[in-house]
Structure formats: structure tokens, C-alpha cells
Amino acid sequence: MPDKTPLADSSKSVDALTWEELSHVLEGLAFAHRPLRAATLKVTRQYDLGPRGAFILSLISGGKIYPLDLSEMLKAGRSLITAELSRLTEAGLVTASPGRHDRRRSELSLTPLGQKACQRVREEMARIVQRNLAGYSIDELMLFARMLRDVRQLEEDETPVVC
């Protein structure tokens, strides 16, 4: 059961939080990737993928079928995405074909093996996240999801780090 002890005075507005109070949020954001990375580890090792490989499988499965879309979504340079796609293709997980609407653009798709690998990763992610958040209500989880969406927004003059 999660510890629901308040970390700050709930009557404060967010701009009045002390660094100590805000640091709990920042630590959560900074280290939240650990369970996701753990969930991808078996597939990543089995197919000798890079750090983005399993996530790319999920993105392609979710409709991001162009390399440029992957680059933008992952905030990674095109050369890094190309290298990862080469590994995924070599492993027999992804194929590329000329685009249906624009033959100059490659469209990516998962092979049957890629679909199985993607499903394994998604099941492991779901298992870990569901275990870790089991003590929260659906309303709390939906609020958490909205907060995560909101916290990742950047202004035009704020440049994200490209990984």
C-alpha cells in the first residue's frame, strides 16, 4: 500500500513550494524511467537492441510509422533513430516499405516477431506499473497521468536535451 503521507502543506500553491517539497516531484520524474527500463531489459538483451529499441516497437505498434515521427517523439536525432531501426530490422522485428501515399518516405511496421516482442514489453511494463500503483484509485491515477502530461511541456525557448 502506498504511503499517502503528505509531503507538503496542501494549502500552499505550487509556486510557494520549498525546494525540499518540490524535490520529491523532481526525484520522482528523474527516476521514473527505472521501472520502464527494467521492463524492456529482457527484450533489449535478447535482440541486442539499443536503449530506445523496445520503446520504438511500442511507438510503431501505436501508429508512429515514419522515422521522423519517432525522432520527434523520442527527441532523438535522426541518426540515432536510423541506427536503432537498423538493429530492429537486423533482429527481424521491424520492416520498412515505401510509403503508400509518398513512395519517398519509408513506412515502418512490426513483423510477427516484433509484435510478440512489443507485447512482452507492454505486459512487463503494465505488470510493474500496476504493482507499484495498486493502492491508488482510478481517479488518482488519471490525475497522475494528466499531471505527467502537463509537467513534460516546454515553452518554445526551452530546448529539450536530445538523447
Image: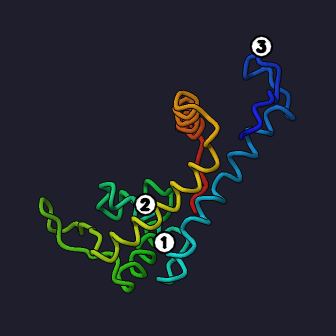
Alpha-carbon span between mark 2 and mark 1: 8 Å
Quarter assignment of residue 22:
top right
Residue at horizontal 77 percent and vertical 18 percent from the top: 10
Residue at horizontal 37 percent and vertical 86 percent from the top: 90
Total residue callouts: 3
Tell me the amino acid under the disc marked 1: Leu
Q: Position of residue 11 (x, y in %)?
A: 77, 13
Residue at horizontal 35 percent and vertical 65 percent from the top: 67
Secondary structure found at label 1: helix
Tell me, yes or no, whether the two marked residues, 2 and 1, touch with CB atoms within 8 Å.
yes
Residue 92 vs 125, above or below: the answer is: below
Q: Position of residue 12 (x, y in %)?
A: 78, 16
Q: Position of residue 122 (x, y in %)?
A: 45, 60
**Sequence order check, earlier mark of 1 and 3:** 3
Look at mark 2 in the image and give the residue it sits on. Answer: 71
Quarter assignment of residue 93:
bottom left
Q: Nearer the viewer, mark 1 or mark 3?
A: 3
Q: Nearer the viewer, mark 3 or mark 2?
A: 3
Look at mark 1 in the image and give the residue it sits on. Answer: 80
**Sequence order check, earlier mark of 3 and 2:** 3
Look at mark 3 in the image and give the residue it sits on. Answer: 11
